[in-house]
Amino acid sequence: MTLEQALLELGRPDSRALAGGTSLVDLMKLGVEAPARLVDIGSLPLAAITLGQSALSIGALASNSEIASNETVERLFPAVSQAILAGASGQIRNMASLAGNLMQRTRCPYFRSTDWPCNKRQPGSGCTAASGSNAHHAVLGVSASCMAVNPSDLAVALLALDAEVHLVGPSGRRSVPISQFYLLPAETPEIETVLRPGELITQVVLPRSELAAASTYLKLRGRASYEFASASIASAILVEGGVVRDVAVALGGLGVVPWRDRTAEAELIGKAIGRQSIERYCDALLAAASPTKDNAYKLDLARGAIQRCLDPDRARDDVTARGSSAE
């Protein structure tokens, strides 16, 4: 099948693209998804990982395993490799594609069970999480219609690294910053991305930078065995002469979409980095949070993780502690 043929098939009503199937097939088994047609795009030539002078291009069908183990990714965009390795088992990484990872849907139990009302699954039916068990739900970007967390680790890393998502569809090609790819739920939580009917992701492009090469990914979760994040941080910081020259921080596990606040980041630029300046940054970053009594703990998790990632003294202490325990 050619790309043109795939787009023609996807242009038919109620058609869905299928690559690795690690997310869509699960939802079909649960009765949450029931597309009329599946279009197998797995053979399309969209799996290349190519480094140019100014950017890295990753094809939409590159497997998560291929991306995570790619030497260029590990060296120039380490947060991407680390996020993938934190996100799933080896078997799933072998099957899952880049585009599938970005398009995976929430693990909210009310969405994944047809026994409960869910505005994301059935618009207008209500949000059971709002009055039910919501300890694992979002505190940022929530609305009265939905508080489900975006599950992607990879998307958090890509957000911190200013990735662009390239799309192709009936109207031609376009690119979208990943910061604009995901949509807040507002009153239409069933519309999760800017992807239009009949469109496909073709590649993700990451600009090369000193900041990207300094990136890292930290994931906090209830158990080590590939659980979804309670809080995660993709971050990078450049410090010169004791002050911050550049910084990027994206949160996972807290938002209905991967979350980044550039206005809050600007508060760190030109400032000495330390516990107090990072606390002020966290105050600005989390000011818009709407926690419940059950998920307010996520705010403390995020603060601790950000301190650990951004404070060079804290990072050295962590390394020393790990070295001591190994002895």
Image (spheres, rainbow, N blue to C red):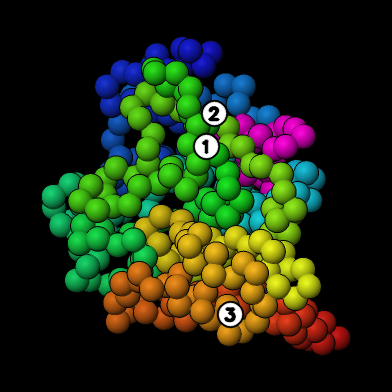
- Residue 5 drawn at (x, y percent): 46, 12
Mark 2 or mark 1: which is in front?
A: 1
Disc 2 marks which amino acid? Thr
Residue positioned 37% across, 58% down in the render:
256
Left or right, 205 with respect to 243, comes to: left
155 sits to left or right of 91 = left
Mark 1 neighbour class, 10 Å CA radius: few under 14, some 14 to 19, many 20 or more: many
Residue stretch rendered in magenta on the structure? 49-68
- Depth order, front residue of 149/276: 276
Task: Give left or right: position of 150 versus 93.
Answer: left
In the displayed structure, would residue 107 be above or below residue 198? below
Furthest toward the right, the residue is 327
Q: Considering only order in the chain, which callout, 1 or 3, is on the residue closer to the N terminus?
A: 1
Q: Is residue 326 visible?
A: no
| Residue 214 lies in quadrant | bottom right
Residue tagged 2: 202
Mark 3, secondary structure of its residue: helix
Mark toward the viewer: 3 or 1: 3
- Regarding mark 2 in the picture, which secondary structure is present there? strand
Asked whether the beta carbons under mark 3 and mark 1 sit within 8 Å of each other, the answer is: no
Q: Nearer the viewer, residue 183 or 84?
A: 183
Q: SS for tag 1?
A: strand
Res 43 → quadrant = top right
The residue carrying mark 1 is: 165
Locate residue 285, reporting x and y percent.
46, 70
Is 147 positioned to the left or the right of 323 in the image? left
Q: Earlier in the sequence, mark 2 or mark 3?
A: 2
Q: Amino acid at mark 3?
A: Ser
